[in-house]
Image (tube, rainbow, N blue to C red):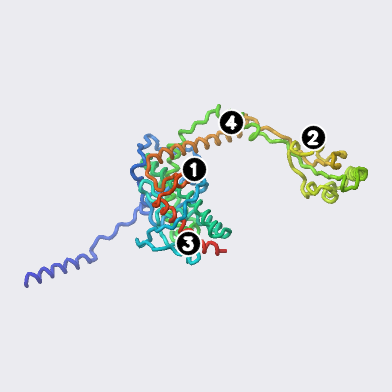
Amino acid sequence: MPPNRLAALAAAIAVLSGCSSGQPRPKPLSPEAFMGPRTEAAAGTGSGGSAAGETARPTVQIPLNASSTGNGAETSSSAAVPPRTSVDALAPAPSAPSTPATTSGSRPTSLPTIGASSGEYMTLGGVVAEVNSTPIYANKVLSVLDPILREKAKRLDVNNFRREAAVDINRRIQELIRLELLYAAAQRTLDEQDKKLADLLTMQWRMQQITRAGGSVELARRRAREEFGMDFDEMAQEQSHNELLKIYDQKKVIPRIQVSAGDIREYYDKHVNDIFSSAERVKFRLLKVDIKKSGDKDKAVARIDQLYKRAKGGEDFAAMSQKENDQTLFASKDALDMNPASFSIAAVRDALAKLQPGQVSEPIQDASGFYLVKLEERTPGQVRPFEEQKVQDEIRLKLRLEQYGRLREQDLGRLMKGSIIRPDPDVLTGRKPATPTELQMLNVALDMAMQKYPAYASAK
């Protein structure tokens, strides 16, 4: 057989042998396959060593701001676990049109007008911010804001909606930047045992979600999409970030909190009157006979005397004050309820100080008319003593939370100084104008929100 025919036959045999059924079968999935990939923080955010000797999880816990979520490397369909607390209000970003990249890599020549929008996102996965080269995507920003924007669109016109959406979006972007900085710090400073603990807690969370969905992974995925508008695997990734940030707080922030007995006593002494004291309160009814409405003073005197005799005789004072009152303000169905010292008519204040519940005062006179007062209920003022354990516990928790907030802000300030962040945080707070690139990044999420406005506004 000619050499060239032999070579062709050998090549064909080689191709066929590659398609044989004798190839190795794929390996079964390991538990790690159920976890999202761990994303290491990008270089340039600072440095720190592992927490030596800190393998046990501390028992002291303090609530975290904004649910302590963060984001590592994201996909174009990234979503966030909704935050539980608000963050500082931010100024709206300018709203010039942007030309973000589409999923196909091309750039649209122009965005559709608001009225002509079909309600579908024209931009998917646009980057609105970067923290040390880690992107934050527009749909991650909007996933949490979606229910808020839906409600606002129902009551706002398009211009007011755009302004408020810009404020909400800027606030969320800054929040995600802060969480990314903290997550990167946690990745650097926590040891492998801490990270494995975060993975274990995330796996437990994942199994709980599957159990709540009836034990089906597919039902859990559907529930995540329908109830939260998120991908289930991405929710698990966010939960992993949550757990790691909680461990970071418990090991790196909470141990630095120091509240002494002197601090607690000082706080009590400073706030004993405005926080730990309650003023006396009274419930009473007031009936007025106006001199002008009665015709003259003599007629007013005769009328108030008659009302007083009826009240002392046991007639329903509440009904009298509602039907026969010359002052509409005092004729309410409900009794007046206040600190007696705050009432404006001095003669009535003096009468309230002497009355016991159920008693009716004698006629009280001032320049405009006469009054009858019936006291229904008196609650004495009181001061909660410092020796009460609950008082000290409340003060201790308040001071610990205040210190926690200050320490968090100090850490974030240090992390921001050592990081490369786009857009500049000062742009988000309105202290600095945006560059064209920053403006384009910020407008990606705003343009996406505006494209959804017609669908939001028309929804019932």
Between 365 and 247, the one lying in front of the other is 365
Front tag of 2 and 3: 3
Front tag of 3 and 4: 3
Task: Report, in whole angstroms, how far the alpha carbon at label 4 lies from the one at label 1.
Answer: 23 Å
Dot 4 lies on which element? helix
For residue 102, above or below residue 244: below
Q: Sequence order check: which comes first, mark 4 or mark 1?
A: 1
For residue 404, above or below residue 435: above
Dot 2 lies on which element? helix
In what quadrant of the picture does the C terminus appear?
Answer: bottom right
Between 311 and 297, the one lying in front of the other is 297
Task: Report, in whole angstroms, how far the alpha carbon at label 2 lies from the one at label 3.
Answer: 64 Å
Q: Amino acid at mark 1?
A: Leu
In what quadrant of the picture does the N terminus appear?
Answer: bottom left
Percent from the top left, x then y, of residue 313? 90, 44
Q: Sequence order check: which comes first, mark 2 or mark 1?
A: 1
> Residue 451 has which mark?
3
Q: In the image, is 38 to the left or to the right of 82?
A: left
> Dot 1: few (<14), some (14–19), or many (≥20) neighbours within 10 Å?
some
Q: Residue at x 58, y 34 (%)?
A: 395
> Dot 2: few (<14), some (14–19), or many (≥20) neighbours within 10 Å?
few
Which residue does the numbered mark 4 point to in the structure image?
267
Do residues under tags 3 and 4 come within 8 Å of each other at their CB atoms? no
Which residue does the numbered mark 1 point to in the structure image?
64
Which residue does the numbered mark 2 point to in the structure image?
353
